[in-house]
Image (spheres, coloured by chain):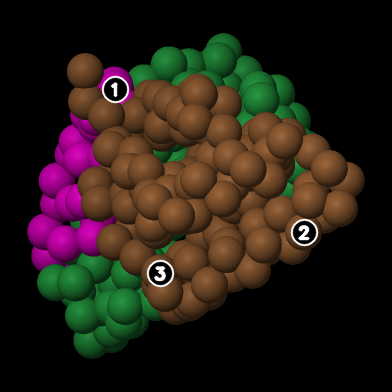
Amino acid sequence: MAVLRCETMPVRSQQDVVAVRQSVRSWAVAQGLSLVDQTKIVTAASELARNTLDHGGGGTARLEAVSDDGRAGLRLTFEDRGPGIADVSLAMTDGYSTGKGLGLGLGGAKRLSNDFDLWSRAGEGTRVTITKWK
Amino acid sequence: MERIPILRMGPFLIVSIQVDMHDRLALTLQADLAARISETGARGLLLDISSLEVVDSFIGRMISDIAGTSRVLDAETVVVGIQPAVAITLVELGLSLPGVRTALNVEKGMALLRAATADARQWDAAAGSETSSENADGSAAM
Ligand SMILES: Nc1ncnc2c1ncn2[C@@H]1O[C@H](COP(=O)(O)OP(=O)(O)OP(=O)(O)O)[C@@H](O)[C@H]1O
Ligand SMILES: [Mg+2]
């Protein structure tokens, strides 16, 4: 898999979350994703960026335009050095939230992407990577 | 402070969200709407989201909460103009906006509101309540 373009954005404020949504949209368009797929990855990005901000205490979003065997894709990585997730499978369960959210963010982001990878360790931080393929 | 404008049209309030809202702006809109409904005694709220290209769980919850709050304040809510790609994404996200009435466009949404509040007026009139005269005033202004 080749990475054709890469950019890292801060996720430290609600305005940053809006900026991430907007960049992800334009990268998704550039990668040739359909309107529905653009909407799905932008929505997933919004969920994960908000988690980075609200639960992780802020961090970064990395956008990568990727290509695998001629297939174009958009890969996004959200990373923070926050408290981490003690029980990942519980956190992935729809309806589970330690805040006042609906608890749909992580499960929803997984459903809206093609590839989903979550790494987290209590006290160290959280990293979630998703990819949407054309 | 940045705010989403709320328009009044007779007995109804109309909001058209034209910007990508950050979370605080969405919460401000929710609070502003509750205040305006109670100030004006509005009977209906039309929420146009046709310009929204993304509705995530936060905005989805805001929409459900607005509909819930206005119901408690005796106003009907209709959400209009959800883009097809947004609708598909919402369902996959796991949000079906329970209890929220939707219509394809503003015209159909207004028709739905008028019908819903006309029923309520008949009911009020039969019960001899005072709200019926307020509604008559409001409708005449439209
Ligand atoms: N980056 C993170 N750092 C620490 N904990 C996290 C992180 N992301 C998610 N979590 C934990 O996982 C739980 C589930 O996350 P999820 O996004 O599914 O729901 P939520 O954020 O609580 O609510 P919603 O996203 O529906 O508004 C969170 O309540 C939180 O405890
Ligand atoms: Mg979340």
The residue that label 2 is drawn on is B122
Chain B color in figure: brown
Dot 3 crowding, Cα within 10 Å, few <14, some 14–19, many 20+: many
The residue that label 3 is drawn on is B106
- The front one of A49 and B74 is B74
- SS at mark 3 in the image: helix
Q: Which residues are magenta?
A: A1-26
Which of pointers 3 and 1 indicates the residue nearer the eye?
Answer: 3
Residue at the image position 34 percent from the left and 39 percent from the top: B6
Q: Amino acid at mark 3?
A: Val
Q: Amino acid at mark 2?
A: Gln
> Along the horizontal axis of the image, is B4 left or right of A82?
left
User: Where residue A19 appears, x then y in whole percent?
Assistant: 20, 40
Is there any visible trace of residue B122 in the rendered image?
Answer: yes
Same chain for the residues at labels 3 and 2, yes or no? Answer: yes
Residue at the image position 39 percent from the left and 51 percent from the top: B141
Q: Give the alpha-carbon distance from disc 1 to disc 2, as whole Å.
A: 49 Å
Q: Which mark is residue A13?
A: 1
Chain A color in figure: green
